Image (tube, helix red, strand yellow):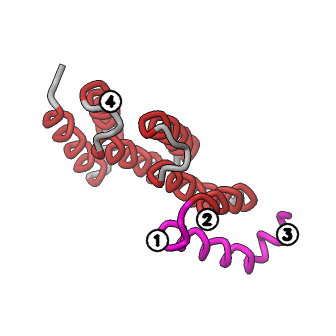
Amino acid sequence: KGSREEYVALSHLATIQRLQQNHVNAEHNYKAALTGLEENVGWKDGFTNHTSMELVKLYRETSREPKAIDTLHRMRKKLAQTFENDNDPRVVQLYGEEAEIQYALGNLTEASRLWNEVVNRLAGNSPVARKAFMKLVELQGDDDYDNSR
């Protein structure tokens, strides 16, 4: 069983590998780091969340959006359990992350639903809520959105 520092270093190594397009090793190392962090420090440690988001980034960069979405769903579940609150900002902001993916996939109705979750659950002065609100305003002006409804 490694230490937090070892898993943090492994996550950093995975990021370097991702940036060098060494996706297979990066994915392996992100998953190993994430498992180690979960077991050693849990989800209250911000680096567990960070490593999971880096894995989401890898999946998006390699056109594996379903895996990115699954990872976001797992993060939401784990963070909601950890902080005992589905409305914790760390949980709710992940709806916005998924909305970005759904939008990129052309799933505009789902993207809209997810951005609405962010706007409705976070305080209006939250930067994440403001960004989600602006995305909704943009979406309402999108002809493709009107045609998809």
The circle drawn on residue 147 is: 3
Of the numbered discs 3 and 2, the one sitting upstream in the chain is: 2
Of the numbered discs 4 and 1, the one sitting upstream in the chain is: 4
Q: Nearer the viewer, residue 20 or 4?
A: 4
Quickly name the residue at label 2: 119
Quickly name the residue at label 4: 38
Label 3: how many Cα within 10 Å (few below 14, some 14–19, many 20+): few
Measuring 54% from the left and 49% from the top, which residue is drawn there?
Answer: 87
Question: Which amino acid type corresponds to the residue marked 4 in the rendered image?
Answer: Glu
SS class, disc 2: helix
Of the numbered discs 3 and 4, the one sitting upstream in the chain is: 4
**Residue 12: percent from left, percent from top:** 21, 46
Question: Which amino acid type corresponds to the residue marked 3 in the rendered image?
Answer: Asn
Measuring 32% from the left and 43% from the top, which residue is drawn there?
Answer: 51
Query: Is the residue 37 above or below the residue 138 in the image?
Result: above
Of the numbered discs 1 and 3, the one sitting upstream in the chain is: 1
Q: Is residue 132 left or right of residue 11?
A: right
**Residue 6: percent from left, percent from top:** 14, 33
- Distance from disc 4 to disc 2, alpha carbons, whole Å, reads 29 Å
Pick the quarter of the image with the N terminus. top left
Question: Which amino acid type corresponds to the residue marked 1 in the rendered image?
Answer: Pro
- Distance from disc 3 to disc 2, alpha carbons, whole Å, reads 23 Å
Q: Nearer the viewer, residue 91 or 137?
A: 91
Of the numbered discs 4 and 2, the one sitting upstream in the chain is: 4
From which residue to which does the magenta span run? Answer: 122-149
